[in-house]
Amino acid sequence: MKGSLAHRLLLLPATLWLLVMLVLPLLVVTIFSFGDRGPAGGYVPAFSLDQYANLPARFTAFKNTMILAPAGTLAALLIAYPLAYYLAVKANPNIKTILLVMIIVPFWTSILIRTYAWIYILGGQGIPRLLEFFGIEGVRLINTPYSVLIGIIYGYLPLMVFPIYVSLEKLDKRLLEASQDLGASPFRTFRNVTLPLSIPGIATGCMLVFILLMGEFLIPALLGGGKVFFIGNALVDLFLQSRNWAYGSAVATTLVLVMLITVSIYMKLMMRGSNQREEVSLL
C-alpha cells in the first residue's frame, strides 16, 4: 500500500499536466465541433453534425496532407537511415562528433529563416536559373508540391536521423561479427540483424516526423505560395481568418482521430520490433 501510494503521488503531477494541457483542450475542441458559427464568428452552442458533413469542402487540404506527409516521412527515412548507419557503425570516432554537430546546426536558426532561404534557392534566381545555364528551361519548383516536399525533408531530417542513430549506436557489434562468422553476407547481416534491431529507432523517427508534418503550416504557406494547403493551413484560416471555430474544431478533431490511428500503428511496429529484437538476442 505504501508503494502504491508513493507511485500515485509520483504520477500525480504528470497526470494533472496531461489532464489540463492535453485532455481538457481536446474535450473543448470536440464540444466546439458539434456547435455552429456565430453571426460575427466564433462559436454558438448547439448539437449538430453539419460541421462534419462539410468536411469534404476541405478535401484538398486533407489530400495534400495525407500524400505529402507520408511521402516526406518516407523520403526523410530513406535519406536519414544511411546517414545514421554511417555515423553509428562506419564513421571514424574522431569526426563523428563533428558530423553530429553539422546535423544539429540547422536547428540553431529559425525555421522561418531557413524556409525563406529555400524560397530563393527554388525560385527563379536559384536552381531554375542554374538549369537554364545548362540549357534546361521552363523548370518551375517554387509554389509546387515538390518545393513543399523539399522543404519538409530539409526541416525535419534531423528528427529522423537521431532516433535511428541512437538505436544503431546501442547495437551490439558482437551480433554483426557472429553473423559474419556464420557465413552471412553483408546484405543478409543487415537484413536479419541490423534492420530488425533498428526498428524502434525507425518507428520513433517516423512518428516524430509524421505527427509534426500533419500539423505543419509554415512550410506549405511559404514554399507552396498559397497553392499547396495542408490541414494546418486550413486550421489557421478557419480559426484566425474566417473565425469559424465550430468547423475548425471538426477539422481538428478529425486530425486527432488520424493521429490516434497512427499511434496504433506505431505501437504495433514497436511490439513487432521488440519481438524481432528478442529473437535475434536468442540467436
Image: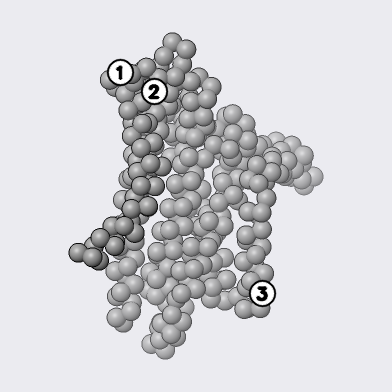
Q: Quadrant of residue 274?
A: bottom left
Which residue is disc 3 drawn over?
A: 95
- Work out whether mark 3 precedes mark 1 in sequence or the reverse, and give the earlier one: 1
Determine which quarter of the picture holds residue 125. Answer: top right
**x 53%, y 63%: residue:** 162
Q: What residue sits right under mark 1 in the picture?
A: 46
Find the distance from the CA under tag 1 to the CA under tag 2: 10 Å
Under mark 1, the amino acid is: Ala
Residue 110 point in image, percent of width and height: 65, 46
Q: Is residue 142 above or below residue 90?
A: above
Name the secondary structure under disc 3: helix
The residue positioned 34% from the left and 50% from the top of the image is 15
Q: Dot 3: within a 10 Å radius of its alpha carbon, few (fewer than 14), some, or many (20 or more) residues? A: few
Q: Amino acid at mark 3?
A: Ile
Q: Which mark is residue 246?
A: 2
Closest to the observer: 5 or 199? 5
Which comes sooner in the sequence, label 1 or label 2?
Answer: 1
Q: Element type at marker 1?
A: loop
What is the image's colouring? one colour
Q: Earlier in the sequence, mark 2 or mark 3?
A: 3
Disc 2 element: helix
Residue drawn at 57 percent across, 76 percent down: 90
